[in-house]
Image (tube, rainbow, N blue to C red):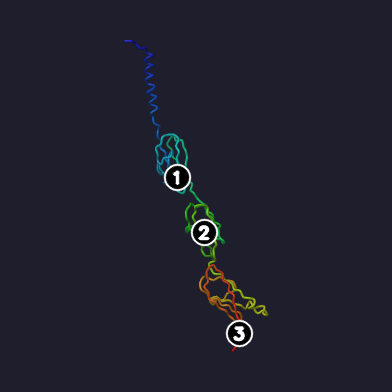
Amino acid sequence: MKRVSLPLLLGLVIATLLPAQSGGRGRQRQPLVTVTIQSNVKGADVTVDGSSVGNTDLNLQLPTGSHTFRVTADGYRDWQQTIDIRSDRTITANLEQITNDLTVTANVPAQVFIDGRDSGRTRFRRSLPPGTYSITLRAEGYLDFTTTVTLDRARSIEAELRPANAGVRLEIPQSMLDRTNPGAASMVTVFVDGRPQVQNRFDLPPGRHTILVRTGGMAAEITQEFEAGRTYVIVPNFSTSIRTE
């Protein structure tokens, strides 16, 4: 039997072990870590490296390394980050809400109500999520103005509020006044439903009213249906006719 020297024998053993050890290391799996994904919007969709993995909040087991996280929700801008994960960690996605500007102006200072809630005064401007809203403007002495607006982009509303009452103005033709009497105009009196009016301009609540104009010993009367927001001008007409007997 041929003898093998000790140095040669050791060399053969090392040569045999090295490939086996090298192959074992190549087959080792990357360690897993726990990643918790949260967001300010509960139930937001989560994808990792392009694959859907569930909804926030959730815990994942991921291999160490670089991963791309994407969190999405209706009405919010997408959130995405690529993060190098080396140990257990928590990721919080703060989603930014998508909003559009609403501007409201009116011909008079008015209170603004959005879906029935008092939201401010004109001139009004606020950023709101996309959607359809009921807008009401309210001012003392004026009829409410109501409209709807769909905020799919920035929108502006210019409201024209109408007076809640009817406006009435009395005009006496100069031809009817006694030009020889300087106080002739002051002799004209106006009654509404039997109540005297101090001025020739006044407001009336909507509805049916009787207007009586007196000057000296003559009178003219009219009954009229008055509508809110409209202005009525009353011009008495005392006509003269001649007949033979």
Quarter the C terminus occupies: bottom right
How far from the left and from the top, in percent, is residue 58?
Answer: 40, 42
Q: Earlier in the sequence, mark 3 or mark 1?
A: 1
How far from the left and from the top, in percent, is residue 68?
Answer: 45, 38
Query: How far is disc 3 from disc 2 in space, using C-alphas?
Result: 61 Å
Identify the residue at the far bottom of this view: 245
Q: Indicate the quadrant where residue 1 lies.
A: top left
Q: Earlier in the sequence, mark 2 or mark 1?
A: 1
With respect to residue 104, does 171 lie above or below? below
- Left/right of residue 13 with respect to residue 218 in the rendered view: left
How far from the left and from the top, in percent, is residue 21?
Answer: 38, 24
The residue type indicated by label 1 comes to Thr
With respect to residue 104, does 81 lie above or below? above
Callout 2: SS: strand
Q: What label does residue 112 carry, if any?
A: 2
Q: Say which residue appears at 38% left-offset and 14% top-offset.
A: 8
Residue on which the image places disc 3: 242
For the residues carrying marks 3 and 2, which lies nearer the camera in this image? 3
Q: Say which residue appears at 39% left-offset and 31% top-offset.
A: 29
Q: What label does residue 72 carry, if any?
A: 1
